[in-house]
Image (cartoon, rainbow, N blue to C red):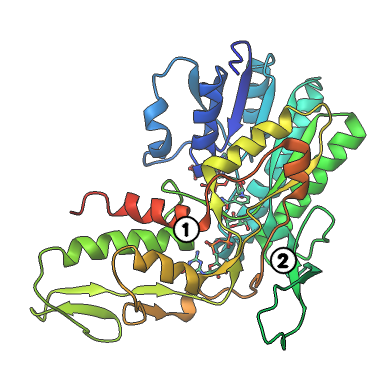
């Protein structure tokens, strides 16, 4: 469906989701204004392919600066949809930089909402990037029947944990607390000012454009570099506790250093999830939706699947668990229930966990024979 007369602003255009959403909206015929903050090095890597494309404009702005938001909105007061994807989005970093995280992730959202109201742009639709991190330690449970295998001596049902739109929030990090504040602010502006403001409570979503310090990409990027290092070498021996060694003792490759491998995450593909964002803003009424796959895996399982794509069955010799990558508080279990998104939006994920990991490993190894 082509929408030639539609215009959207994306805050957070230079991030993983911003770039996928821009691709989607431009393909639908939207004009897209992407807001990027000033950086001393080039931060437009993920939207390079869009620079100079008809209908795409990059403007400079920072969501912690009300003046910059107001002037961008004022200059684009014909905008139909505003997507707030901008945030300090790394959970571990939020423990080290809680003030900055609060300013960008919580206050930034309020700055945009308040500017929309102050400028009288009440008919502009608004999307807030909420997060499954907001659930933190909390989950609900459901009892599901188990297909019994003869001799029928096991339990006939099992208890499954999940989170959906009715699960309460019990945030476990400065990031998650900031996201809760932004989420409640979005609801307040919806109810208080009648703004068409929706929040997508998105579970982890990844892909080849994922930031290199999130666990999926950290693993697939390491695999890519390792495979490149190994390429053409005759023999690899174990090395020491920090590195892998070839027959030449000074030719070493650092092991992959990770933190907690036991946490469960519901991982999906970012390209699928930005469609759900757009669908939310096409509804007659604004609302909140959980977006997820409904399947969950540990980081150990992720390592199994990722390493198996390059023919390594036992990754334990290549991975070191390092206390530096543990967090002061952890979210142990995330598995979403996407029934509402399926039934109201007609959205469902198109890529499985296995497809996702394969796509990421292939992308990070694509120049290796
Ligand atoms: P990301 O790759 O980290 O992108 C974040 C974006 O926000 C980047 O463009 C970043 O700009 C921008 N930004 C940060 N501070 C800013 C500021 N003060 N002013 C303007 N822009 C600023 O995150 P993502 O994975 O695309 O996620 C998009 C949004 O969804 C985030 O709000 C995230 O918290 C949320 N979310 C993500 C997931 C997930 O699994 N990916 C799940 C749930 C919710 P720079 O490029 O200059 O740093
Ligand atoms: N980043 C990272 N690095 N995580 C590690 C590492 C490591 O070396 N080792 C283990 N982990 C574990 C973390 O402790 C966490 O349990 C899990 O891997 C996932 O970590 P991340 O990939 O950093 O993602 P996240 O779940 O903390 O947060 C992401 O998803 C949220 C939605 O649930 C981010 O994209 C957030 O912005 C998003 O809101």
Q: Residue sitting at 56 percent across and 67 percent down?
A: 297
What is the number of the mark on residue 136?
A: 2
What is the number of the mark on residue 323?
A: none
> Residue 13: where, in percent of width, then height?
52, 35
> Residue 147: where, in percent of width, then height?
70, 73
**Quarter of the picture for ligand 2?**
bottom right
Q: Label 1: state its secondary structure.
A: helix
In the rendered image, is residue 213 in sight? no
Q: Give the left or right position of residue 120, taking residue 136 as reference.
A: right
Question: Looking at the image, is 319 positioned above or below residue 56?
Answer: below
Pick the quarter of the image with the C terminus.
bottom left
**Residue toward you, 127 or 336:** 336
Which tag, 1 or 2, sits closer to the chain's start?
Answer: 2
Pick the quarter of the image with the N terminus.
top right
Q: Residue sitting at 15 percent across and 63 percent down?
A: 231
**Residue toward you, 40 or 34:** 34
> Residue 240: where, in percent of width, then height?
25, 86
Find out whether the residues at labels 1 and 2 contact each other: C-beta distance under 8 Å: no
Q: Residue sitting at 66 percent across and 37 percent down?
A: 277
Mark 2: give few (<14), some (14-19) or many (20+) Cα within 10 Å. many
Disc 1 to disc 2, C-alpha distance? 25 Å
Residue with the mark numbered 1: 354
Residue 132, located in which quarter of the rendered image? bottom right
Question: Looking at the image, is 10 positioned above or below residue 26?
Answer: below
Q: Give the left or right position of residue 355, taking residue 179 as reference.
A: left
Residue at the extreme front of the image, as rendered: 150
Q: Nearer the viewer, mark 1 or mark 2?
A: 1
């Amino acid at each position: 469906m082509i929408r030639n007369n539609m215009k959207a602003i994306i805050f957070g255009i230079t991030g993983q989701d911003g770039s996928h959403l821009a691709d989607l909206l431009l393909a639908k015929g939207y004009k897209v204004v992407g807001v990027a903050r000033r950086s001393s090095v080039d931060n437009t890597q993920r939207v390079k392919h869009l620079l100079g494309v008809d209908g795409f404009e990059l403007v400079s702005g920072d969501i912690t600066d009300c003046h910059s938001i107001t002037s961008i909105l004022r200059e684009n007061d014909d905008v139909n949809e505003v997507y707030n994807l901008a945030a300090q989005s790394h959970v571990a970093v939020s423990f080290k930089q809680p003030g900055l995280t609060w300013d960008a992730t919580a206050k930034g959202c309020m700055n945009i909402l308040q500017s929309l109201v102050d400028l009288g742009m009440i008919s502009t639709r608004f999307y807030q990037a909420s997060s499954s991190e907001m659930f933190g330690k909390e989950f609900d449970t459901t009892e599901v029947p188990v297909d019994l295998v003869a001799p029928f001596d096991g339990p006939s049902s099992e208890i499954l944990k999940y989170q959906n739109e009715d699960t309460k929030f019990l945030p476990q990090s400065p990031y998650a607390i900031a996201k809760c504040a932004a989420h409640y602010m979005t609801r307040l502006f919806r109810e208080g000012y009648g703004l068409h403001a929706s929040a997508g409570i998105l579970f982890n979503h990844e892909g080849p454009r994922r930031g290199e310090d999130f666990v999926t990409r950290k693993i697939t990027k390491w695999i890519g570099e390792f495979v490149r290092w190994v390429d053409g070498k005759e023999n690899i021996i174990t090395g020491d506790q920090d590195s892998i060694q070839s027959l030449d003792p000074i030719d070493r490759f650092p092991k992959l250093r990770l933190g907690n491998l036991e946490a469960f995450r519901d991982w999906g593909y970012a390209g699928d999830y930005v469609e759900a964002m757009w669908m939310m803003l096409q509804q007659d009424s604004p609302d909140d939706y959980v977006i997820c796959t409904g399947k969950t895996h540990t980081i150990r399982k992720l390592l199994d699947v990722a390493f198996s794509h390059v023919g390594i069955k036992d990754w334990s010799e290549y991975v070191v668990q390092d206390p530096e990558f543990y967090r002061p508080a952890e979210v142990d279990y995330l598995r979403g229930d996407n029934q509402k998104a399926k039934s109201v939006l007609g959205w469902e994920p198109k890529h499985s966990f296995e497809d996702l990991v394969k796509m990421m490993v292939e992308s990070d190894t694509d120049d290796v024979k």
